[in-house]
Image: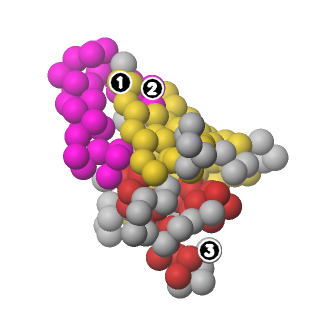
């Protein structure tokens, strides 16, 4: 199993500040259409195919892999992506919270496995290293906040 976590400040010094509501809008937009937030060409399809009062379902093609996710939104707080089909199984979470100093933070954490692969085998170890590396989920959090600021500046948030 793979467990990874990363946390970044939502409003580091020198950046245009985002309110919790603005950061949340960015997370919700990313959940509904990852193409707006991932590097060009990485996500080639992202469609919401079902919706209920408690969750929605999206189908996407990311890095050439087709997947289906059940996504729950805890308003202004947490987005959880349950991996229903695709190469991974488990949950990925993006969470907004205030730290002990009252500063807004964005945290990623996941607990997942790779379907059809040996637990803690070479494939999972490589995935763990990727998640925890410089281009992993910490970088994804920072790019999500950057794109949220761009959408806000463009009046699209």
Rendered residue at 57%/37% (across/down): 100
Task: Point out the residue furthest to the front here.
Answer: 101
Task: Point out the residue furthest to the right here.
Answer: 53
Residue 63, visible in the rendered structure: yes
Rendered residue at 42%/27% (across/down): 112
Nearest to N terminus: mark 1 or mark 2: 1
Q: Secondary structure at mark 3?
A: loop
Q: CA distance from mark 3 to mark 1?
A: 33 Å
Q: CA distance from mark 2 to mark 3?
A: 30 Å
Give the magenta range: 110-139
Tell me the quadrant of the picture where the N terminus can be found.
top left
Residue 57 sits above or below residue 11 on the image: above
* Residue 34 horizontal/vertical position (percent): 48, 60
Give the colouring mode of the picture.
secondary structure
Q: Which residue is mark 2?
A: 111
* Residue 123 horizontal/vertical position (percent): 22, 27
Nearest to N terminus: mark 3 or mark 1: 1
In the depicted view, which residue is nearer to us: 134 or 86?
134
Quarter assignment of residue 95 = top right
Q: Secondary structure at mark 2?
A: strand
Question: Is there CB contact under 8 Å for labels 1 and 2?
Answer: yes
Q: Which residue is mark 3?
A: 157
Other-residue count near label 1 (Cα within 10 Å), few / some / many at <14 / 14–19 / ≥20? some
Residue 95, visible in the rendered structure: no
């Amino acid at each position: 199993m793979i467990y990874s976590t990363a946390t970044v400040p939502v409003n580091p010094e020198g950046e245009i500040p985002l309110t919790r509501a603005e950061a949340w809008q960015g997370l919700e937009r990313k959940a509904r259409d990852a193409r707006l937030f991932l590097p060009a060409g990485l996500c080639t399809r992202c469609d919401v195919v079902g919706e209920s009062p408690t969750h929605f379902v999206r189908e996407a093609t990311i890095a050439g892999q087709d997947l289906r996710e059940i996504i729950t939104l805890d308003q202004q707080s947490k987005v959880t992506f349950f991996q229903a089909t695709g190469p991974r199984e488990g949950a990925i979470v993006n969470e907004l919270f205030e730290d002990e100093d009252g500063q807004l933070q964005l945290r990623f954490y996941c607990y997942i496995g790779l379907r059809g692969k040996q637990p803690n085998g070479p494939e999972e170890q490589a995935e763990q290293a990727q998640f925890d590396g410089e281009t992993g989920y910490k970088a994804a959090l920072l790019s999500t906040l950057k794109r949220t600021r761009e959408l806000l500046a463009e009046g699209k948030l």
